Image: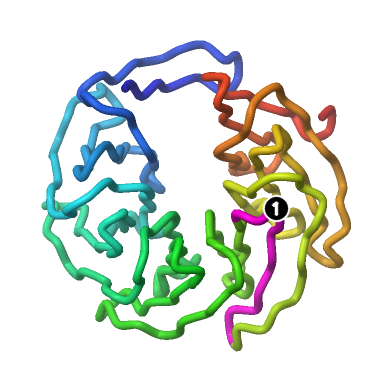
Amino acid sequence: MTIRLWRVSDGSLLRTLVEHTAPIRSVAISPDGALIAAASLSTVLLYRMADGSLLRTLAGHTDSVTSIAFSPNGKIFATGSTDKTARLWRVADGALLHTLVGHTNWLTSVAFSPNGSMLATGSDDKNTILWRVAKGKLHRVQAHMKWVRSVAFSPDGALLAIGFWEKIAQVYRVSDGSLLLTLTGHTNRVASVAFSPNGEMLATGSDDNTARLWRVADGEPVRTLTEKEPLNCVAFSSDGKVLATASYDTNARLYTLSDA
């Protein structure tokens, strides 16, 4: 029920935020590093990074918020919920801009394209949907055979990676929805996917207690990082030199990739 901020250079705890009274499902930091958004139950709380003060509480979803993402320019953020909708909010005043209706089951992940024009949403309805952000309109539905756990755009916006409940991740071309890669090797659901900043690597985190690194050019596995409990999140540092993981063993870990 807390959010903790850590200094990457030495792993020291900087601040603990404790406004929530229920488990926190998702957190996101604005591109300029000034804000933290956190989801718990059906609300989102916005904090000021500098002092940890609560700026605003946003309500509107009718069930739990599962995923949050800021747009690249930091002016909008998106939320996905078990109420089967995604919502777009204006950061400056918390105004609801659009409610995105199209999924028929829980949303599990939301992600903005690098230019901020598109939003990808993944759901337990076995679909990913691309939305046009400016007008909140559906662009394309991509049907899959498996429940979607996580979505992520490549840094150039050309690719969309998807992690699935059924042990695999896939990479699609955004322009036409064609399948380019299927990544196999995990032995349990793939809960999180993330591209490296240069777009050359894809990280996946799984309930099989591993994070894996894959070469995007050909889908070849590069490295496996093994932990003691299932992983629910992976993320690269902005320079691509560090991979962060979050595990059900209550720990977050940082791996220096040259040494991992």
The residue nearer to you, when weighing 104 against 217, is: 104
The amino acid pointed to by label 1 is: Lys
Tell me if residue 10 comes above or below residue 256 in the rendering: above
Q: Viewed as shown, does residue 96 lie left or right of 239?
A: left
Colouring scheme, one of rainbow, by chain, secondary structure, one colour = rainbow
Q: Residue at image x 25%, y 19%?
A: 18
Quarter in which the C terminus is drawn: top right
Q: Secondary structure at mark 1?
A: loop
Membership of 169 in magenta stretch: yes
Q: Residue at image x 55%, y 60%?
A: 152
The residue nearer to you, when weighing 230 against 150, is: 230
Q: Residue at image x 56%, y 39%?
A: 233
Q: Which residues are magenta?
A: 165-175
Give how far across and how far down residue 103 sits, in percent: 35, 71
Q: Residue at image x 66%, y 42%?
A: 206
Give how far across and how far down residue 195 sits, in percent: 65, 54
Q: Is residue 166 visible?
A: yes
Q: Residues within 10 Å of mark 1 (few under 14, many from 20)?
A: some
Q: Viewed as shown, does residue 234 lie left or right of 17?
A: right
What residue did someone put label 1 on? 167
Tell me if residue 169 comes above or below residue 257 in the rendering: below
Give how far across and how far down residue 47 sits, in percent: 24, 33
Quarter in which the N terminus is drawn: top left
Give how far across and how far down residue 86 sits, in percent: 29, 63
Quarter of the figure with residue 19? top left
The residue nearer to you, when weighing 155 against 1, is: 1
| Total marks in image | 1
Tell me if residue 172 comes above or below residue 89 in the rendering: below
Task: Determine the residue located farthest toward the top in the rendered image.
Answer: 12
